[in-house]
Amino acid sequence: MKSFDFELNSKDYIDFNLYNLNNSTTIKKSLIAVRVLLSVIILIMTLALVKQGNVIGYIYFAVIWSLIMFFFPKGFRSRMKRRIGKILNEGKNAYFLGPWSIKLLEDGIVTTNSYSESKTRWDGIEKIIEGEEHIFIYVGVASAFIIPKRAFPDNNGIEEFLTTLRSMMSRGNS
């Protein structure tokens, strides 16, 4: 049995949600649809308002369209980050923020915090993702155990954890 202790803060939770936003096929498709729709609306408005052959009107359209295509996704993610932060500030959120412990057992993972203890069998884990600052152990499409890399003393500790985790997961699923 391997046990790891760490502390989750608001930034960890926000980072997890932003990771999901940035990697969700549904969100990516929605952002493309919104950009295309806004582009079409701006094109129609420009064509309706600009006299044919008026170069200034077409430059105006090109600038607005460029802003939408390049800055809309970044603005969307920035607004989502602020909204997630506001949601976190609405309550104590002591259930998922604060000290955590995770134990890797032969038959699954046990997670413990000040308010709960739960066990997830290995076959209940969908995937393991290593991000820049976190390890996400997904148990659903938008639900995961969030483990900050700062919980480990160094990169060797992170690699050892991931190797142990993957090994136990493959043994548990076989």
Image: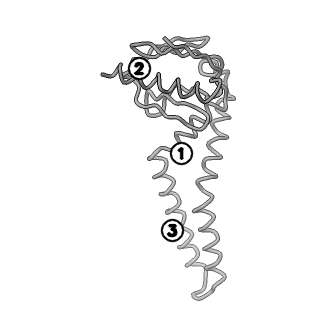
- Residue 155 drawn above or below residue 103: below
Is tag 3's residue or tag 1's residue first in the polypeptide sequence? 1
What type is the residue that disc 2 sits on? Met
Q: Mark 2 points at which residue?
A: 168
Secondary structure under tag 2 reads: helix
Q: Decide which of 36, 48 is in the foreground and name it.
A: 36
Is tag 2's residue or tag 3's residue first in the polypeptide sequence? 3
What type is the residue that disc 3 sits on? Val
Q: Where is residue 166 in the image (x, y as percent from the top left)?
A: 43, 26
**Residue at horizontal 44 percent and vertical 47 percent from the top:** 25
Secondary structure under tag 1 reads: helix
Q: Nearer the viewer, mark 2 or mark 3?
A: 2
Q: CA separation, marks 3 and 1?
A: 24 Å
Secondary structure under tag 3 reads: helix
Looking at the image, residue 102 sits to the left or right of residue 26; the answer is right
Q: Mark 1 points at which residue?
A: 22
Is tag 2's residue or tag 1's residue first in the polypeptide sequence? 1
Q: Mark 3 points at which residue?
A: 40
